[in-house]
Image: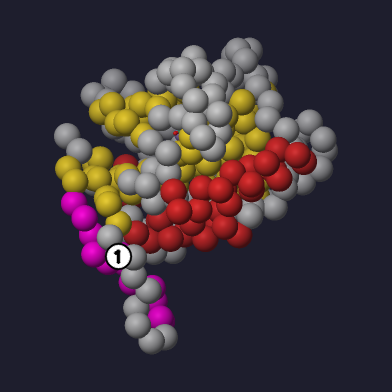
């Protein structure tokens, strides 16, 4: 079961910090498993900035429903920003530097996204996260993401940082084996899930989104998944 604790400071202080250590106070952290936790509402203070970032990204690289290698169309609409973007088509899953729809590089990773992810990773115990890829997922009511592992990255020493905006969802968090028991974890606007270390390759997914309306996103949930892919 998830256990809750409030942490007064980040567990991994910044190396070579000059002056007072850089710490986060009052982070509401819920442990999911060794190496995995939720930082409740961590992104909420900059939600408008994040929403504007998503608008700017989708103006250049619109959301699209990608094809799985098996020929299914994904229910979740996706786009990317950063040096690398996650794509899937009949040829398989991979990271690509160019948007296959436009042939152009993906939009740059906004500094606000990068800084938030680095701060969240550090608060969760991963002090040297360097994201170079951000997958932007858009869920409308009924859309779901089936149980999977994030395993297309080069370095499993780097964590995954996953930011929820808009409508609430139920996150499934399992284990190393697909058949392992899954926890059903409610995720709200502003919540950030971080998993790495022993949990880096754990299975996870999202149950079908329920109907609703959110002040910032309307009838949608937006997820930002930040990774070090290359
Ligand atoms: O939407 C989420 O919370 C999870 C997204 C995810 O697992 C992924 O993009 O690989
Ligand atoms: Mn995933």
Q: Residue at x 49, y 56 (%)?
A: 116
Question: Considering depth in this image, is 128 or 18 the residue closer to the camera?
Answer: 18
Which x, y percent locates residue 80? 65, 40
In the image, what residue occupies the spot 25% across and 45% down?
30
Image coordinates of residue 39 in percent, x first then y, are 33, 49
Determine the residue positioned at 57% across, 57% down: 112
Q: Residue furthest right?
A: 103
The reply, left or right, for residue 156 in relation to residue 182 is: right
Q: Which residue is mark 1?
A: 25
Residue 126's spot in the image, x, y percent?
37, 59
Count of all numbered marks drawn on residues in the image:
1
Q: Residue at x 32, y 31 (%)?
A: 186
Decide whether the magenta segment is chiefly helix, strand or loop: loop
Is residue 6 rendered magenta in the image? yes
In the rendered view, would you say 157 is above or below 152? below
- SS state under label 1: loop
Relative to residue 216, is residue 96 drawn left or right? right
Specify the segment rendered in magenta. 5-17
**Nearest the camera: 210 or 226?**
210
Look at the picture and state if 194 lies above or below 144.
Answer: below
Where 21 sits versus 207, above or below? below
Quadrant in which the N terminus is drawn: top left
How would you rate the neighbour count of disc 1 (Cα within 10 Å): few for under 14, some for 14-19, many for 20 or more? few
């Amino acid at each position: 079961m998830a256990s809750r604790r409030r942490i007064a400071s980040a567990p991994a202080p910044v190396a070579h910090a000059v002056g007072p250590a850089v710490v986060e106070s009052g982070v509401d952290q819920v442990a999911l498993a060794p190496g995995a936790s939720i930082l409740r509402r961590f992104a909420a203070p900059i939600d408008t900035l994040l929403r504007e970032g998503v608008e700017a990204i989708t103006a250049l690289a619109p959301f699209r429903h990608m094809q799985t290698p098996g020929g299914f169309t994904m229910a979740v609409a996706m786009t990317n920003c950063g040096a690398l973007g996650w794509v899937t088509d009949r040829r398989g899953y991979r990271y690509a530097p160019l948007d296959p729809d436009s042939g152009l590089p993906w939009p740059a990773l906004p500094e606000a996204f990068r800084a938030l992810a680095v701060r969240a990773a550090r608060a969760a115990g991963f002090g040297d996260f360097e994201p170079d890829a951000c997958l932007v997922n858009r869920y409308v009511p009924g859309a779901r993401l089936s149980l999977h592992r994030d395993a297309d990255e080069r370095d499993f020493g780097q964590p995954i940082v996953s930011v929820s905006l808009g409508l609430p969802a139920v996150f499934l968090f399992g284990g190393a084996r697909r058949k392992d028991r899954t926890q059903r974890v409610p995720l709200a606007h502003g919540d950030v899930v971080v998993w790495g270390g022993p949990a880096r390759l754990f299975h996870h997914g999202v149950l079908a989104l329920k109907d609703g309306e959110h002040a910032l996103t309307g009838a949608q949930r937006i997820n930002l998944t930040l990774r070090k892919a290359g």
